[in-house]
Amino acid sequence: MLNLLSDIPGLTVGHATDLALGSGVTAILFDEPAVASVAITGGAPGERDTAALAPGATIERIDAIVLSGGSSFGLDAASGVQAVLRAAGRGFALGAARVPIVAQAILFDLLNGGDKAWGRYPPYRELGERAAQLAAPGAFDLGSVGAGAGATTATLKGGLGSASGVTRSGHRVGAIVAVNALGSATIGDGPHFWSAPFERDGEFGGRGWPARFTAAEWAPRTKFAPGGATTIGLVVTDAALTKPQAYQLAIMAHDGLARAILPAHAPLDGDTMFAAATGHRPLAEPMRELTELGHAATLAVARAIARGVFEATALPVPGAQPTWRDRFADRQPGRD
């Protein structure tokens, strides 16, 4: 186990990162089409083909999920991923035609200081193609890479994080999240993560929660640039789920977002969580085991969010937002 989304057999992950642009794309490709759905709880989302993932819609399985920066310009990334899959003969068969099913969510990173003067057409189709071409099994980078390259939060540089776990029934659950929140993943002005109660093996610094909370620490810390937020992600399980069950899993995954970022699901957030199931292990007791999967997804998402912020590095631009490591890496836990 790598404590990554790739702990779930049957998928690959690839990043395309442009630090000068201050943005990037992450592509998750499934070896075989996966049952999938999505839950959208933020007030300002941006997506592609998410309506097809509604529980009552005809298409049940998808070939890939794309997470991207670039706001609505970034929606071109799915076309690049789709081109790679089509060249490989993947896709939903309609007579002699095949249409790769690629769903996508985007975050807003247009005001982070990167060079967005890309000319007539944005670069996201090519970034999506590169991310798909680089998709591979096993370990992948976290922090300021892929969809998390240009991500920010209210207080610290955001990034891309991932985590995984196993339920009591033996099902694997993994999460990958691009953290570009209107709120904050850390408590007050200190180094402690809201996700701290769920941390495993010091994966984001091992600081725990502060000994006490003040009213000032509970006060919201937000960024109010128009459209300047959105946390997007995906949870995947090796369980065999129906599409309505995947939808329920996506809903429960949002609980992890709400435990890791305060405030969450705000009017200027576009918070979106996909859920997919590779179907390798059937559910013996569907109600109980789906509940366990949702709980495991909650914890994995909360941990992935903290890891994304913890692993982030600053953009190479003037006035770049500071990172967790910039501010806290040299502080001893006992002095917090």
Image (cartoon, helix red, strand yellow):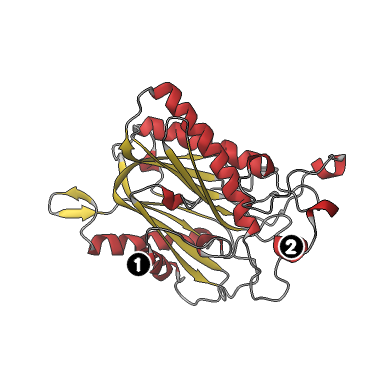
Q: Which residue is mark 1?
A: 133
- Check disc 2: other Cα within 10 Å, few if <14, some if 14-19, many if 20+: few
Which of the two discs, 2 and 1, sits closer to the camera?
2
Residue 308 appears at what percent x and percent y?
60, 56
Q: Is residue 276 above or below residue 205?
A: above
Residue 32 appears at what percent x and percent y?
27, 49
From the viewer's perspective, is 140 left or right of 155?
left
Can residue 228 be seen? no
From the viewer's perspective, is 328 left or right of 176?
right
Which structural element holds mark 1? helix
Give the mark nearer the N terminus: 2 vs 1: 1
Can residue 16 be seen? yes
Q: CA distance from mark 2 to mark 1?
A: 35 Å
Callout 2, which amino acid?
Answer: Ala
Give residue 139's quadrant in the image: bottom left
From the viewer's perspective, is 150 left or right of 50?
right
Callout 1, which amino acid?
Answer: Gln
- Check disc 1: other Cα within 10 Å, few if <14, some if 14-19, many if 20+: some
Q: Which residue is mark 2?
A: 329
Residue 286 appears at what percent x and percent y?
38, 24
Q: Residue at x 71, y 63 (%)?
A: 325
Which structural element holds mark 2? loop
Disc sitting over residue 247 in the figure: none
Residue 334 appears at what percent x and percent y?
82, 52
Q: Residue at x 40, y 67 (%)?
A: 125
